[in-house]
Image: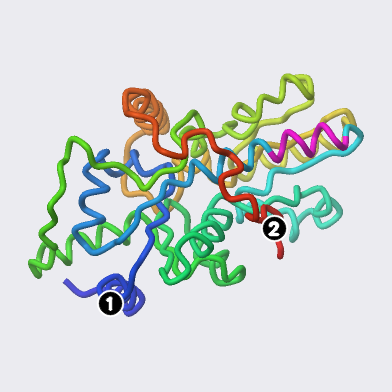
Amino acid sequence: MELSDNLKKIIKIINTKKTVCLLAPAFPVDFKYPDIIIDLKKIGFSKILELTYAAKLISIRYSKILKRLPEKQFICANCPSVVKYIENKYPQHKAKIINVASPMIIMGRYSHAEYPSYKTIFVGPCLSKKQEAIENHEVDFAITFKELQEIFDYYAEKKLFKKIDIDPKTVDFNKLYNDYTKIYPLSGAVAKTMNYKEIVEKKQVVIADGIKGIDLAIKKMEKNKNIRLLDILFCEGGCIGGPGIMSKDSLEVKKKKILDYKKECKKTPMGEHFGKFEYYKDLKLRRKL
């Protein structure tokens, strides 16, 4: 099989440099856990991080911002496609985009601080992450789940998989957090994980996905000044509906895979940094540095 020049470049980097894989939490839709970690190590990744640590930091920061500024309306900034959509179609509301970076960007910052000599490669369900990586310079490369599978297929065809000494029963992420932020790929996950009930009323939060849903959410916010937060994602169903996903399953089946993975992870031992939300105290969370 023939790979794109970009994937060839990434394979070369994985095999010649120390690398960190930043794996989006939507991965259970397309890949089995923990097999995916073993396969990533077999193609040469040095470290593998799940973005749930950044997700938790974001949820905590959102809570603090909404509590500190009770009169303001905010739009979730996790989805780069949503950010671009608001900036282009609703420029009058772009100041409401919350000044907190996406999970990919925050985890990229963490990786460069913790592993300064490593290259970072994000793998997820989203095409717009590629442009986000280019514009922010916080992540070296971004590819989709489909492209990762192409790399796996190429390695299988060329018999390039590395032999690794690893126990499948104990393999896990180089993780920092193992918690309910694993639901971040699902629509409404930000609101659910930030414990907003202590800060705002349920009717003050609008959850929506897809272009039509976003447009309706904007209209609701414009008509009702009491609405405090738009938790919106560009793809229908959230990140599990992303164009970089291979699965043709229904959104309900995809959602179940995420929830089953979250449930399964409750059985795993807590990592060394479990719950240490301030583990990297100098980590900047704002959108632009």
Query: What is the x, y in percent for residue 46?
Result: 30, 61
Secondary structure, mark 2, is loop
Q: For the N terminus, which image quadrant?
A: bottom left
Magenta stretch contains residue 67: yes
Q: Are marks 1 and 2 in contact (CB under 8 Å)?
A: no
Residue drawn at point x = 13 percent, y = 63 percent: 162
In front: label 1 or label 2 = 1
The spot of residue 214 in percent (x, y) is 68, 41
C-alpha span from label 1 to label 2: 31 Å
Sequence-wise first label, 1 or 2: 1
Q: Secondary structure at mark 1?
A: helix
Residue at image point 73% right, 33% down: 63
Residue 287, which numbered label? 2
Left or right: 40 as drawn, with respect to 57: left
Residue type (three-letter) at the residue carrying disc 1: Thr
Q: Quadrant of residue 88?
A: bottom right
Crowd tier of the residue under label 1, counting other residues whose Cα lies within 10 Å: few below 14, some 14–19, many 20 or above: few
Amino acid type of the residue tagged 2 in the rendering? Arg
Which residue does the image show at 60% across and 52% down from the upper left? 102
Q: Quadrant of the C terminus?
A: bottom right
Colour mode? rainbow
According to the picture, the residue beneath numbered tag 1 turns out to be: 16
Span highlighted in magenta in the image: 61-69
Give the x, y percent position of residue 154.
17, 66
